[in-house]
Amino acid sequence: MIQQFELIQRLKQYIPHLDETPINKAYVFAMKVHGAQLRASGDPYFSHPLEVANILIDLRLDPASIITALLHDTVEDTSATLDEIKALFGHEIAQLVDGVTKLTRIELQSEETKQAENFRKLVLAMSSDIRVLIVKLADRLHNMRTLHYIKKREKRNRIARETMDIYAPLAERIGMHSVKDELEDLSFSILNPEGRESILSRLRYLHEVSGQHIETILLELRQLMDAHHIDISLSGREKTPFSIWRKMQIQNIAFEQLADIMAFRILVDTVPACYQVLGILHGEYSLIPGRFKDYISMPKNNGYQSLHTSLIGPMNQRIEVQIRTRDMQKIAEYGVAAHWYYKKTQHDVVHRTASHGIENPSEKTAPMEGKQYAWLRGLLDILEHAHNPQEFLEHTKLEMFADQVFCFTPKGDVIALPKGATTVDFAYTLHSEVGDRTVAARINGRQMPLRTVLHNGDQVEIVTSPSQNPSPAWERFVITGKARARIRKFVRQQQHSQFLELGKSLLRRVFEKEGLDFNDDTLKQVADLYNVPADDTILSVGQGHITAKDIFEKLKNRQSTLNTHPMPVHHAREDLSPTQPVSIQGLIPGMALHYSKCCHPIPGDTIVGIVSEGRGVHVHTFDCEHIVHFKEPERLLHLSWNHNIDETARFVTRMSITFLNQQGCLARVMSLIAGQGGNISNLRVMHRTAEFWDISIDIEVSGHDHLSSILAALRTSPIISKAERH
Ligand code: MN
């Protein structure tokens, strides 16, 4: 286990003026809170965060990342809290530790990694600071190095699979190739030990029959470049068993045909020198066709730049050679982390690149300008020019998936949604049927309003009911096209049948007022009238385009001219009052029926409707100002409440209350209303003087009786001077 002083020493090698205090503090704190906890290996638990810190020091990361590594498991696995971390180490560290903790929780939540692509995006999106992801990758790397201590085979396999599918690609995405290679090879050794062993034994055999080639080839390449007076750094290695295995799989070829079991790397100072080295190699050795790649003019997505070629090299060995500048090597090796390593020399690098650009036009199109390289380049620029931690944190937020959120189903599947999506969008993404039947949603185990906007990592459970239907209100907050289209379609269908229903009620009323029956025969006559299906005409009546009276008059005129089909007189109905109201039974509020916001009608009120063209009926109370002054009696409609209104239905009514301005009085008013089962949906303070409060309050009630009981309760209270319906 690495000691405290060694850790400091290693850090000081690249940060000479290191402030040791916070590092020491984190070391002691983590050791203390992890206490006697043990790893599966039998080592003290604290050895793990220490090793993670050590890996990050290899990558030359900044002190904040090292401290985060030391603390990364304290919140999740010990009694330590985030507040404690914040108090001891400050805001920046607390944010980083929180980020890593959240990623760890996500990891525990998802049992399956079948949706690797979405999961990778989720991890990226949650790594608000790139250092969170880097610490997480180092954490995973150490866990992989010690994975063989885990006894359960299924668990080992699951973790290895997850590493292969998610963390190795992430390491590659941010350009950390050495981390990616090691993660892959460690996973490979768990998932396919036989496959790996077969590669290793093959390599051993090759070494036996033809000895160690690498040294000899290195020497010959060195001499070749010396002869051309080119200053190079040279290294060679055998590829990892996993990369050899994968090449065999992808290219579907035998081991012997593999060109690149050995890979050599030549580093030079400038881009022109890269192409010069390439020319020398291609002149000296035969190249293997189809293997040349120019990642300098076409960088990879993660910013990687290099020339790759495969040759029949020295000693007739098939080798792969990578040629790049020393600057490109920094990116290839550390990826984003290169920034901290080379922060000191960044200025020189930029300066040098610029001057070369002037000397040689080919340089301009090369390194730092490539489009593919932009995101990393942008990130490095921001890091370079950010002067304080605040600015730094703000700018390093990964924007790659800023327009998406990723949420879990209770089973752990990841659902990708556009940013701003709500629980209803989530439900429709699962299945249209689920969306249509949604009645409630639980987010992270807690019931939340359907309109709640989802956040990364939320676990969402949709509660459905077979009797539920899409609500027109949902259309106002859903943002996905699928949800919107489904809801609209349903609302349109619903409106159609609602207007039809309303049209029938209106026609029936006119007919019955005249003492006539409204039956199938009448419907047939209505159809004949315009020579279109009766429903079309009735719909027009419901929508207010034609009045029911018009239809009636037209039918009457037609009959008197044709003198056929006399309208049947229904004598039993003659005693009916001519003002027989239209029942609003079956009409859904918000569709063909709207409760007006001026008088807030509730069951028990005498109600009147105004038919407005295309929008259905607006319901007002009989004494509403609006009705009293309404000038078009032909559009007025006497309405009646449905006699068996659902007991759970609630209607909003408004009341004004005046009460004493004394301590606790407002609370008393609220509790009086709540005591009568009234739910407050809105509250406005109209006046407040030294003596009195004047408030206007919207309350959901079941009807007249309910409202009366609330008013009575309020009026009996000595603190209330006035309480009345608005
Ligand atoms: Mn850990």
Image: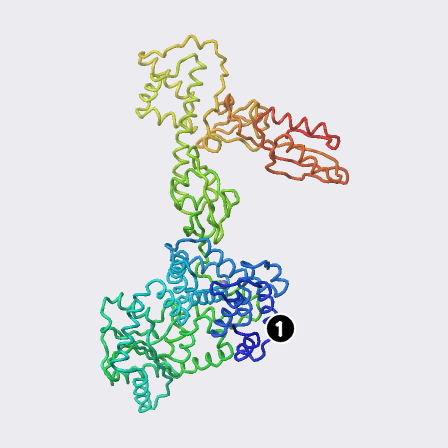
Residue at image point 33% right, 18% down: 525
Element marked by disc 1: helix
Badge 1 amino acid: Thr
Quarter holding residue 93: bottom right
The C terminus is located in which quarter? top right
Q: Position of residue 167 (x, y in %)?
A: 41, 63
Quick one: 288 or 27, which is closer to the camera? 27
Identify whether 230 is placed above or below 599.
below
Which scheme is used to colour this image of the protein?
Answer: rainbow
Write the residue at 45% across / 51% down.
407
Measuring from the top left, give residue 475's x and y in whole percent.
Answer: 45, 41
Q: Is residue 415 visible?
A: no
Q: Residues within 10 Å of mark 1 (few under 14, many from 20)?
A: few
Q: Position of residue 491 (x, y in %)?
A: 41, 36
Q: Would residue 108 appear left or right of 709 to someone viewing this image? A: left
Residue 19, image quadrant: bottom right
> Front-most of 132 and 196?
196
Q: Residue at x 34, y 24 (%)?
A: 534
Out of 687 and 489, give the one closest to the viewer. 489
Residue under circle 1?
21
In the rendered image, the residue lying farthest to the top is 571
Q: Position of residue 49 (x, y in %)?
A: 52, 67
Horizontal side, residue 168 vs residue 692: left or right:
left
* Left or right: 242, with 148 as reference point: left
